[in-house]
Image: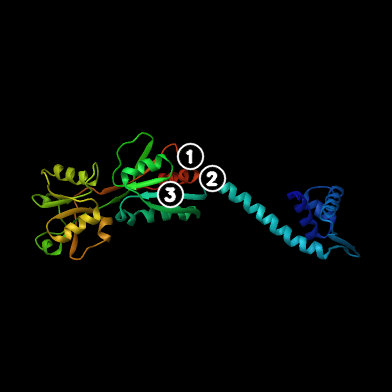
Amino acid sequence: MLDPRQLECFIAVAEELNLNRAAIRLHMSQPPLTRRIQRLERELGVELFRRTAGGMELTEAGTVFLERAYRIVALSTRAVERTRLASDGEIGHLSVGYYDPAILNGIPELIRGFLDQHRYVTVSFELIAKHNQIDYLRDKVLHVGFGRHYPEEPGIACRPVIFEPLYVAMLRTRSLDWRSPAAVVDLRDQPLIVYPATRPEFADEVIDMCMRAGFTPRVAIEAEDVVSCLAYVALGTAIAVVPESATKTVPDGVVFLPLTDAPPAALYCAHLLDNSAPTLRLFVDYLDTRAP
């Protein structure tokens, strides 16, 4: 079986066509190099070099073997490099969970920055209800999950990664009676749609925002998600507070007024602390280097 040193010796002699120069290049004396070439020829059962008046030259078999030797060395080098990259997480896969199509407006840009730095990593997106994401993280089916709000869970790290300004969504005909930009106090006595219905969630942030402004919001509808929330808005019976990402999907007749005195809505990234996957470690390091 060929070993890498044999190939290295053969390539050096084939390129130099001089045993002495090849030995100097390989930092060895000439006799051991000669023995290595002779042993290689015996193993292959062919003559790789022939003596000439000017020194030596490759035989036809030697020329063919040189081409293959270059390929073997290149493949071997690439295999070592890729193995090391995989160990460091530079080659691998990142599984991303999200629960709401609307939040995808911010996530790809975030992950694109990561992929720009780690070009051999692949990514998959999984639409998973947020209450299931924690289980998927614990089972290591997911590397990271994205959502508006995560309850505190032992062993789960959660950090804000994106902050979005808020908007008031309403039917265009209703907006004629509003000033733009809007203020939180303008929501007083307005029929309000909040989402999602499960708690704790973004709906609680909207309600708390109103309470801090000095009034209890008049919640008319609790929608399941932002899509159904905007569908209710399009009916014209109520308004809603939504983050900027929700404004990218606009039902007919719905407009968005900036809510300038409201705190931005945070989008969080969650991951399992004891997941030692190299690619996840790299992604967490990437998040550490960027300010949300």
- In the rendered structure, find residue 95 and report the number of the disc placed on it: 3
C-alpha gap between disc 1 and disc 3: 14 Å
Residue type at the position of mark 3: Ser
Between 38 and 177, the one lying in front of the other is 38
Between 148 and 231, the one lying in front of the other is 231
Say whether disc 1 or disc 3 marks the residue closer to the N-terminus.
3
Say whether disc 3 or disc 2 marks the residue closer to the N-terminus.
2
- The crowding category of the residue bearing disc 3, from other C-alpha atoms within 10 Å (few below 14, some 14 to 19, many at least 20), is some
Q: Which residue is mark 1?
A: 276
Residue type at the position of mark 2: Asp
Q: Which residue is mark 2?
A: 88
Do the numbered discs 1 and 2 sit on residues whose CB atoms are within 8 Å?
A: no
Q: Nearer the viewer, mark 1 or mark 2?
A: 1
Residue 135: image location, x then y, percent: 37, 40
Residue type at the position of mark 1: Ser
Residue 106: image location, x then y, percent: 34, 55
C-alpha gap between disc 1 and disc 2: 11 Å
Q: Residue at x 87, y 48 (%)?
A: 31
Q: Residue at x 13, y 44 (%)?
A: 213
Query: Which SS class for mark 3?
Result: strand
- The crowding category of the residue bearing disc 1, from other C-alpha atoms within 10 Å (few below 14, some 14 to 19, many at least 20), is few
Between 164 and 120, the one lying in front of the other is 120
Q: Is residue 189 left or right of residue 97?
A: left
